[in-house]
Image: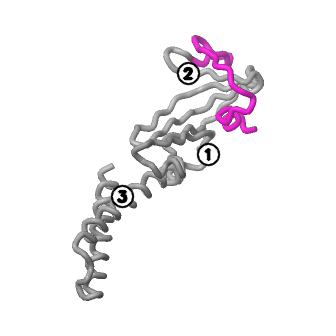
């Protein structure tokens, strides 16, 4: 976050410097308001670029085997450009590197779910996906995976057959 603030300030100074150089080239004929306006435009453009490139920069930092299952796009009145191109602020991913199957429960896959959001800490939890029954049990709040592959104290959530998170975990 601090580095993004530095980048935004540097963009403002950079565009203002270009305006100053252009003013020098044209013999100081540019109006004086052009310098703060160019600094503001540089900072605004850099902030917009940082917002829109968040998804690509975040997913590029993921190791091999982490698959993005879904994203959340938003529109807001204080960012009017998001009505033209929605802004992605959250993602849900599956870390398939840690997928495990149990011999006694062949339709179940234990996987790691990642929740990431812009300006939010990344959270991770384990979940068991029933690939045949189209459901998921999160291993949180006392839910555990038993020795026989069964799940104890878990609440199963029914999923659609085309659920992206389930497909990423099950490898369909």
Instruction: Residue 98 in the image: state x and y as whole percent.
Output: 60, 36
Residue 67 on image: x %, y %: 61, 44
Q: What residue sits right under mark 3 in the picture?
A: 44
Segment tinted magenta in the rendering: 144-172
SS for dot 1: loop
Give the vertical position of 97 relative to 102 (above or below): below
Colouring used for the render: one colour
Earlier in the chain: of badge 1 and badge 3, it is: 3
Q: Quadrant of residue 154?
A: top right
Q: Where is residue 150 in the image (x, y as percent from the top left)?
A: 67, 16
Queried whether the magenta region covers residue 31, the answer comes back as no
Q: Name the residue under label 1.
A: 65
Residue underneath mark 2: 139
The quarter of the displayed image where residue 172 is located? top right
Q: Is residue 104 left or right of residue 87?
A: right
Q: In this view, does 166 lie to the left or right of 37?
A: right
């Amino acid at each position: 976050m601090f580095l993004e603030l530095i980048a935004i300030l540097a963009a403002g100074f950079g565009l203002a410097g270009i305006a100053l150089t252009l003013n020098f080239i044209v013999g100081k004929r540019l109006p004086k308001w052009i310098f703060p306006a160019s600094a503001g435009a540089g900072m605004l453009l850099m902030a917009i670029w940082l917002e829109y490139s968040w998804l690509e920069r975040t997913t590029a930092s993921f190791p091999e085997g982490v698959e993005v299952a879904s994203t959340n796009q938003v529109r807001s009145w204080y960012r009017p450009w998001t009505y033209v191109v929605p802004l992605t602020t959250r993602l849900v991913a599956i870390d398939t590197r840690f997928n495990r199957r149990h011999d006694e429960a062949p339709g179940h896959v234990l996987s790691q779910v990642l929740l990431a959001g812009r300006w939010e800490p990344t959270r991770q939890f384990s979940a068991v996906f029933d690939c045949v029954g189209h459901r998921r049990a999160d291993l949180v709040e006392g839910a555990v995976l038993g020795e026989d592959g069964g799940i104890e104290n878990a609440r199963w959530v029914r999923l659609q057959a085309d659920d992206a998170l389930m497909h990423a975990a099950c490898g369909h």
